[in-house]
Amino acid sequence: MITRYALFEGRIHTGQTEAFRAAILAEVLPHWQSFPDVLAVRVCFENERDEGAPEMPLILAISYPNRAAVDTALASPQRVAAKAATEAVLERYFTGRIHHHITQAVERVG
């Protein structure tokens, strides 16, 4: 399984945390869920962090069966719509940057 993470590093505008979270869930999450070949979408909102760690109010993880599926999703019209919806929410509530990381999971049981 391949997971593409989007790390939202920065700050939510003062007093806007709940509005930001609600907007992500209502306005953007449906777009992320519509990507082709998606296995899972995880929206993780930061509640706490280690002292000195950067603020990451949102970590998004979208999992796919393989790298080809990631490429298909990134080239899709659904991603274009998701990017526009994300930018609209960020403009209202967020100051910072987003960086992406593509990972491959290795699971061991026992």
Image: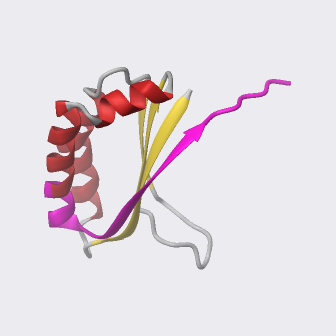
Question: In the figure, 69 relative to 89: above or below?
Answer: above
All told, the count of numbered labels is: 0
| In magenta segment, residue 99 | yes
Relative image position of residue 74 (x, y in whole percent): 31, 37
Quadrant assignment for the C terminus: top right
In the shown orientation, is residue 105 left or right of residue 92? right
Colour mode of the rendering? secondary structure
Relative image position of residue 53 (x, y in whole percent): 57, 73
Which of the 4 image quadrants contains residue 68? top left
Quadrant assignment for the N terminus: top right
| In magenta segment, residue 36 | no
The residue under the point 51% across, 72% down is 54
In the shown orientation, is residue 7 left or right of residue 20? right
Which of the 4 image quadrants contains residue 18? bottom left
The residue under the point 49% across, 21% down is 65
The residue under the point 80% across, 24% down is 109
Question: In the figure, 103 relative to 48: above or below?
Answer: above
Q: Nearer the viewer, residue 66 or 60?
A: 66
In the shown orientation, is residue 20 left or right of residue 60? left
Question: In the figure, 25 relative to 47: above or below?
Answer: above
Residue lying at the far bottom in this picture: please name it. 52
> Where are the magenta residues, as a range?
88-110
Relative image position of residue 79 (x, y in whole percent): 23, 37
Question: In the figure, 56 relative to 41: above or below?
Answer: below
In the shown orientation, is residue 108 left or right of residue 45? right
